[in-house]
Image: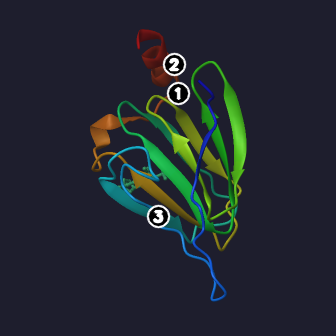
Amino acid sequence: MNLIQWVDFPPLGDERGSLVALESGKTVPFPIERVYYLFGTVLGVARGFHAHKKLQQVAVCVTGSCRMVLDDGERREEVWLNSPTKGLLIGNMVWREMHDFTSNCVLLVLASEHYDETDYIRNYEDFLKGVKND
Ligand code: TYD
């Protein structure tokens, strides 16, 4: 399976502007249990640096841009999130890092589970061990 998987959000535009609707289990391929967004990220700061045991997420830059690095333990790829109509699907057991946030970046994240700190793997060596045992 491709490490980079986009989810397209068709814009429902008319002469007044654009609108994107996100529906749990439809436009987003899992039931959405949580929504959060990152904004006001200080220039030069990188975030993430973790994987999740179970959690699936879709991340979309509704404004601005950032660079997302994904790593499944074998492959490391990077993409720019810079479109409010393109979400990036991030599966479980994928290491993610976010870099190069523009000052206006609002990164919206749709998540398949409620917040659970025990689902995080924050150490890269532990992540690699977890991938091998999966
Ligand atoms: P964290 O996941 O470490 O941020 P990132 O990976 O984007 O750099 O989250 C930062 C803090 O916010 C951390 O203390 C946990 C808390 N948090 C919640 O309480 N609920 C949430 O849904 C998220 C995503 C984070």
Residue picked out by circle 3: 37
Looking at the rendered structure, the secondary structure element under dot 3 is strand
Q: Which residue is pictured at 43% across the width and 18% down the height?
A: 130
131 or 109: nearer the viewer: 109
Residue type of the residue flagged with mark 2: Leu
> Compared to 73, does 62 lie above or below?
below
Q: CA distance from mark 3 to mark 1?
A: 24 Å
| Color theme of the render | rainbow
Disc 2 and disc 3 in contact, CB within 8 angstroms? no
Q: Residue at x 43, y 32 (%)?
A: 92
Q: Hey, which residue is sitting farthest top in the picture?
A: 133
- Identify the amino acid type marked 3: Tyr
Side of 82 where 131 appears, left or right: left
Tell me the mark number nearer the camera, choosing from 3 and 1.
Answer: 3
- Crowd tier of the residue under label 2, counting other residues whose Cα lies within 10 Å: few below 14, some 14–19, many 20 or above: some
In the rendered view, would you say 113 is above or below 133?
Answer: below
Residue 105 falls in image quadrant? bottom right
Distance of mark 1 from mark 2, alpha carbons?
6 Å
As rendered, which of 125 and 21 lies closer to the eye? 21
CB-based contact (under 8 Å), mark 3 and mark 1: no
Give yes or no for contact between labels 1 and 2 (Cβ–Cβ under 8 Å): yes
Q: Which residue is mark 2?
A: 128
Gap in Å between the C-alphas at discs 2 and 3?
Answer: 27 Å
Residue 70: x %, y % from top left? 61, 36
Q: Nearer the viewer, mark 2 or mark 3?
A: 3
The residue identified by callout 1 is 124
